[in-house]
Image (cartoon, coloured by chain):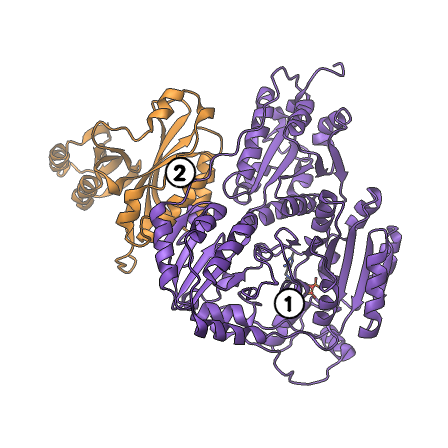
């Protein structure tokens, strides 16, 4: 059953740069859990900078909830920076593995659709094909919808990953230059544009 | 190892000592024994042996709350560490800078369910500002320095450092890290200050409300309020941030707040909140809170702004700086009508005039000198003390506001008393809460602490719970009667060598208080009061401040006495 439509509830794509230390993930997820913010997807990976990991998560909620979640995150000692992707142009991708049932009759059609989506076949079984699809959320959803009539056996999505577009890096330059993780200090610059966009609390910090 | 060689345990003491830590409260055990062994080489640090780790951490909190400096406590692994959890949660909610050090099993045993192993960093994750497991001995002093910096900087809070036993024993070769400078506090934005000023200028019914985050800004806040001539409300945690003797003071807001404070909030058109987080015990029903007011919220912690109440002018920054800026160029507001209204509400106080808990608490707090520290435990006596005590300066009122921890008051008073041996550290407690940490009487004895004055308001009930049962559960007094099983508090004190006094009625009270306060040693006073006595005004949970019940409602069966209530309780 789908939840009743709530205009305030939206997905927000947020990245966090965090110190690569034990329990960082627990700290962040437990903060979300305790305060009742729902994480729809979460991906974590290391960055080009040793000692720093990047997390991208999708939080559902109204603007105020997300704003509050981000401010709480910014207070954590492990968090170096929070990036709200809705404020700038960004690229995002998600990878999904989809196992689709096939019959001798459907095989060709399924492969044709997959080609249209530039999906790669990563496993071939007698009764199923497994595809790898990369793309933004819309593409992945469309692919799954196209395959649904044939019978989807399993799917596994990685969750979204995102980067700001252009040549500006999200990671503040001092992070690159100082080298050591221990010299990192949280950049608790409550993002100005974010406030303005939020519309609720005026941007006076 | 020779005496001069360092190991992890010695490096820990050296680091604490380098940070100017003079006293720690703790309790030893297997996984922290190297640290206790090393302690013997560091006589400059005083270790206070509590009788329960919870006592140790509350004492550290009392120390921190009285001085504004960091409080330090130490415990062993497993049960010792878990006994700290309540105190950590307490310190987290009240923003108290605490460094908690725990021992843990050796690294190779961690994660194997070894004897007395507990995942204390996992357990305390939500109730600490940050926590660490030290996995490399060479990191230890650096971690301590960083932990102290985190605990004290910005919005203060508790930080836990867990040290595996093998790290305590490992040889240490490095330097001892020097204290980190406190990071700069962001300055409030000039636009924000300007907006706030404009709003204040236009106000017809302004009120200032200050919380625990403004304790170190008392001077600036007092100047600010007087410059604008705006009445001031101090929350439970902010009591003392504005002198009670000033005519502008309206008392405490919230569930057991004053008529003046709650009415002023309900009518205000501009509310300037400084260093407070709009706790639900303060706001009552949030959408009924200050319904007509534009809110200016000054806070260091950006996450607090807009968290509970809608904020019209957010001012992020240090309370001191912000209050100083807001006082600049202020002109006294000329608001005779508002003044009159507020003055009328201010007369609606209820000084307890007949024998009961309120009467007893008032008799005690009336004896406070400006320097005295007053601590309280949690319950009716706490709210009565908060309503009735008068504070001229900050950090003289110590209680558990955010977590409402029974058992907090007495050990906190010991910590505060040890921090300031020259002043009296008075604590009011209930007969219920006192028994949660009563064993700390031994700490008084052991260290010959002479300035702690314990007052137990004995109403034979878990009074605050009984009051709720009376008001909201048709007087079904379920599991709140203590009178049939309370100890003889005088004998209990005597058993620990602590002199004790008792008053059973109003007539005996002045003499008993004199004897108690004049005793050169730490001493205990038990005041036996009637069972059924409520704290009013009261805003029922979930109601808005304007729905305050001002006076104690008449009882359905008037004149019910001790025994009858006790019978009912027993038969319930
Ligand atoms: C550790 C803990 N357990 C339970 C409570 C709930 N509680 C709040 S007030 C109260 C009654 C306190 O009774 P007492 O200490 O006798 O003080 P009184 O209210 O009678 O002044 C209780 C049980 C609490 N605050 N803390």
Front-most of B188 and B532? Answer: B188
At x 63% / y 64%, what residue is drawn?
A: B383
| Residues tagged by mark 1 and mark 2 found on one chain of the structure | no
- Is B17 situated above or below A85? above
**Would the CB of label 1 be found within 8 Å of ligand 1?**
yes
Give the quarter of the image for residue B455: bottom right
The colour of chain B is purple
- Nearer to us of marks 1 and 2 is 2
Residue B113's disc is none
Q: Secondary structure at mark 2?
A: loop
Q: Quadrant of the C terminus of chain B?
A: bottom right
Provide the residue designation for mark 2. A188
The x and y percentages for residue B328 are 43, 51
Pointer 1 local density, CA inside 10 Å: few below 14, some 14–19, many at least 20? some
Asked if residue A124 can be seen in this view, the reply is: yes
Q: Residue B465: which disc?
A: 1
């Amino acid at each position: 059953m789908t939840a009743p439509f709530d205009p305030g509830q939206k997905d927000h794509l947020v990245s966090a740069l965090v110190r690569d230390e034990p329990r960082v993930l627990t700290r962040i997820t437990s903060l979300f859990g305790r305060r009742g913010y729902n994480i729809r997807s979460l991906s974590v990976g290391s960055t080009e900078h040793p000692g720093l990991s990047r997390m991208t998560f999708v939080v559902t909620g109204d603007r105020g909830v997300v704003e509050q979640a981000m401010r709480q995150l910014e207070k954590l000692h492990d968090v170096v920076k929070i990036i709200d992707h809705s404020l700038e142009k960004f690229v995002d991708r998600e990878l999904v593995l989809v196992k689709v049932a096939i019959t001798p009759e459907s095989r060709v059609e399924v492969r044709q659709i997959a080609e249209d989506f530039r999906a790669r076949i990563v496993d071939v079984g007698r009764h199923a094909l497994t595809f790898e699809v990369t793309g933004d959320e819309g593409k992945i959803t469309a692919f799954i919808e196209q395959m649904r009539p044939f019978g989807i056996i399993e799917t596994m999505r990685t969750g979204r990953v995102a980067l700001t577009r252009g040549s500006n890096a999200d990671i503040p330059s001092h992070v690159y230059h100082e080298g050591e993780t221990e010299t990192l200090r949280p950049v608790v610059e409550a993002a100005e544009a974010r406030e303005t966009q939020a519309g609720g609390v005026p941007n006076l910090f | 190892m020779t005496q001069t060689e360092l190991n992890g345990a010695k490096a820990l003491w050296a680091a604490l000592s380098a940070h100017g830590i003079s006293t720690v409260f703790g309790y030893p055990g297997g996984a922290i024994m190297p640290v206790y062994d090393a302690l013997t080489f560091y006589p400059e640090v005083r270790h206070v042996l509590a009788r329960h780790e919870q006592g140790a951490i509350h004492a550290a909190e009392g120390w921190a709350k009285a001085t504004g400096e960091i409080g330090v406590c130490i415990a062993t692994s497993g049960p010792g560490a878990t006994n700290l959890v309540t105190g950590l949660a307490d310190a987290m909610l009240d923003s108290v800078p605490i460094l908690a050090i725990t021992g843990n099993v050796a690294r190779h045993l961690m994660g194997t369910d070894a004897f007395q192993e507990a995942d204390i960093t996992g357990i305390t994750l939500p109730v600490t500002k940050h926590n660490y497991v030290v996995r490399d001995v060479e990191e230890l002093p650096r971690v301590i320095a960083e932990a102290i910096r985190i605990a004290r900087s910005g919005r203060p809070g508790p930080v836990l450092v867990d040290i595996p036993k093998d790290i305590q024993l490992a040889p240490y070769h490095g330097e001892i890290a020097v204290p980190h400078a406190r990071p700069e506090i962001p300055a409030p934005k000039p636009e924000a200050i300007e907006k706030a000023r404009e709003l204040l200028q236009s106000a017809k019914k302004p009120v200032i409300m200050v919380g625990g985050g403004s304790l170190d800004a008392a001077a600036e806040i007092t100047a600010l309020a007087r410059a604008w001539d705006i009445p001031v409300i101090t929350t439970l945690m902010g009591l003392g941030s504005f002198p009670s003797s000033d005519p502008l003071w309206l008392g405490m807001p919230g569930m057991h707040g004053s008529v003046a404070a709650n009415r002023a909030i309900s009518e205000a058109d501009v509310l300037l909140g400084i260093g407070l987080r709009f706790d639900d015990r303060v706001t009552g029903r949030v959408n009924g809170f200050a319904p007509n007011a534009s809110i200016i919220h000054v806070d260091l912690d950006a996450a607090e702004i807009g968290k509970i109440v809608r904020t019209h002018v957010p001012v992020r920054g240090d309370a001191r700086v912000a209050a100083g800026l807001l006082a600049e160029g202020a002109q006294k507001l000329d608001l005779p009508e508002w003044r009159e209204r507020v003055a009328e509400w201010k007369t609606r106080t209820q000084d307890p005039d007949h024998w009961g808990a309120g009467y007893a608490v008032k008799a005690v707090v009336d004896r406070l000198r400006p320097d005295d520290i007053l601590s309280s435990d949690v319950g009716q006596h706490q709210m009565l003390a908060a309503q009735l005590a008068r504070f001229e300066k900050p950090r003289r009122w110590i209680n558990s506001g955010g977590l409402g921890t029974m058992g907090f008051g007495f050990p906190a008073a010991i910590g505060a008393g040890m921090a300031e041996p020259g002043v009296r550290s008075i604590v009011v407690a209930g007969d219920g809460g006192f028994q949660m940490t009563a064993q700390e009487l031994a700490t008084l004895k052991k260290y010959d602490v002479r300035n702690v004055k314990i007052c137990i308001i004995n109403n034979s009930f878990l009074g605050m719970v009984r009051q709720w049962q009376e008001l909201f559960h048709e007087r079904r007094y379920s599991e709140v009667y203590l009178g049939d099983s309370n100890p003889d508090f005088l004998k209990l004190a005597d058993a620990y060598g602590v002199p004790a006094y008792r008053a059973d009625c109003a007539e005996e009270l002045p003499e008993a208080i004199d004897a108690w306060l004049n005793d050169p040693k730490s001493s205990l006073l038990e005041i036996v009061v009637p069972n059924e006595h409520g704290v009013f005004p009261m805003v029922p949970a979930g109601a808005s401040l304007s729905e305050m019940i001002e006076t104690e409602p008449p009882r359905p069966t008037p004149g019910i006495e001790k025994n009858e209530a006790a019978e009912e309780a027993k038969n319930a």
